[in-house]
Amino acid sequence: MAGDRGLSGPHLARILGAWRSARPGYVALAAGVRLLVLDGRLPLRTRLPGERELAAALGVSRTTVAAAYAALRDEGFLTSRRGAGSWTSLPADRRAVPAGIEAPPEADVIDMSAAATAAPEGALHRALAGAVAELPRHLPGTGYGAVGLPALRAAIAARLGARGAPTAPEQVLVTAGAQHALALLLRVLAGPGDRVLVDHPTYPNALDAIRAAGARPVPVALAPDGWDLAMLEATLRQAAPRLAYVIADHHNPTGLTLGAADRERAVALARATRTPLVVDETMAELTLDPGADPPAPVAAHDPAGEAVVTIGSASKAFWAGLRIGWIRASPTLVGRLALARATLDLGSPIVEQLVATELLADAEPVLALQRSALRGRRDALDAALGAALPRWRFAVPAGGLSLWVELDAPHSSALAAVADRHGVRVAAGPRFGVDGAFERFVRLPYNLPEPLLGAAVERLAVAWRAVAGNVPAGAPEPALVA
Ligand SMILES: Cc1ncc(COP(=O)(O)O)c(C=O)c1O
């Protein structure tokens, strides 16, 4: 068995964290490594350090490490070859994937790991033609611009106004997508060691951005039916986060939408605690069911952008390949962000900004087509899961791009690992949480065409049968928060 990568003793010691418990040393160590594998934090086929090296890094005897490795081997979490080393594996792997069968070629894998759509073909071509026609007017300039093209800032402000949050173009900063917007905000509003309040679960790349800024995500659990405002208030007051990051519309991954009264209350809490409320509206335009539009934007309760900072994007409504997003804030904060941006990039590309301007100028027909295609796909995925995996439970969201599915056993990481071998890629629940939460959940986007969704569900059902029947009874269940 060839390992994909290896890690050193000190490295494994670091990610093991506080592994010691009241149990015998080798049992506790084996449990720590097993949890890392199940949570996906220690990828499959990773070569573990030698016994002597890990013993030195952990300050334990070599016998302890040898016994832990032996236990892991017995359970199927480790595969060893004399003289070559030991690699992480899954018990389910051994039985689900007959020896000699490798992962399918990349082209045959159905990728359900990204909640994003293909470009709306005709509309994108037309917008590009319009942008090319506009381009000559911009060529005499340098092409640099930290806040964005005036026409695009005006178009974004107009769209926000039409949705119920009157906005001046000076309140808008154009970014390279919502992810860039969050990174920029973190750079300006938070620093190493700061706390950042997050919904739990939340968008994984937001968690990564917070950690990359040296800050610490402080989770506030979402209930099955929405936000817990009392917990939000307690966390704002007690944890004193530098900012709060909330996905208020068709939340990724749960599909939940913050109600009108709770929006008003959340803004009042942000004001009272002087905590900037960063609202990610990336999914806001993807309401699939008639009459299920989210309430007016959270920013409607804060016209000047003093308490609420809004992040938006063209990625889900139109196409992520444009890499166009925005921030709505006070003109003062827009100025600070524009200055900070100079250390990251010096502005957004002109042609893409012009394309986004064109798309926003006549958004409704494009959005209507996107929504109706997604509605059909959502319903197809719902039906396919109901038929093939009736014990998985989920609420069908009124919008957004994915189902947040509760499995009938807490083995999401194992499912993701085994499903990959069966030709379908999914994001395991723990990607959406902190500290290994959400092993009982998996996110399944419905952005792909219906026949592919059907095939993906068939593969998932095979993978799940292998996983659910194979995880040893003695394996610890990772902590569940939701
Ligand atoms: C909630 C949320 N925020 C941000 C992003 C990133 O969007 P962008 O492509 O605009 O960077 C996504 C993409 O999935 C998302 O779901």
Image (spheres, rainbow, N blue to C red):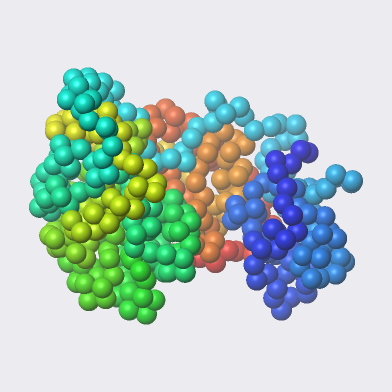
The foreground one among 380 and 302 is 302
The foreground one among 66 and 169 is 169
Does residue 283 appear in the picture of this structure?
no
User: Residue 278: horizontal and vertical position, in percent?
Assistant: 29, 59
User: Residue 15: horizontal and vertical position, in percent?
Assistant: 64, 61
Quarter of the picture containing the C terminus is bottom left
User: Residue 330: horizontal and vertical position, in percent?
Assistant: 19, 58
User: Residue 26: horizontal and vertical position, in percent?
Assistant: 79, 68
Side (left or right) of 295 relative to 313? left
Q: Exactly how many numbered labels are in the figure?
A: 0
Residue 381 in the image: above or below residue 414: above
The image quarter in which residue 423 lies = top right
Side (left or right) of 146 relative to 437? left
Most extreme residue toward the right is 83
Quarter of the picture containing the N terminus is top right
Does residue 175 appear in the picture of this structure?
yes
For image coordinates 20% across by 59% down, the residue present is 332
For image coordinates 17% across by 25% down, the residue present is 137
The image quarter in which residue 65 lies = bottom right
The foreground one among 340 and 292 is 340
Side (left or right) of 66 relative to 40? right
Side (left or right) of 189 relative to 423? left
The foreground one among 82 and 124 is 124
For image coordinates 42% across by 69% down, the residue present is 195
Residue 108 in the image: above or below residue 422: above
Residue 50 in the image: above or below residue 345: below
For image coordinates 71% across by 79% down, the residue present is 22
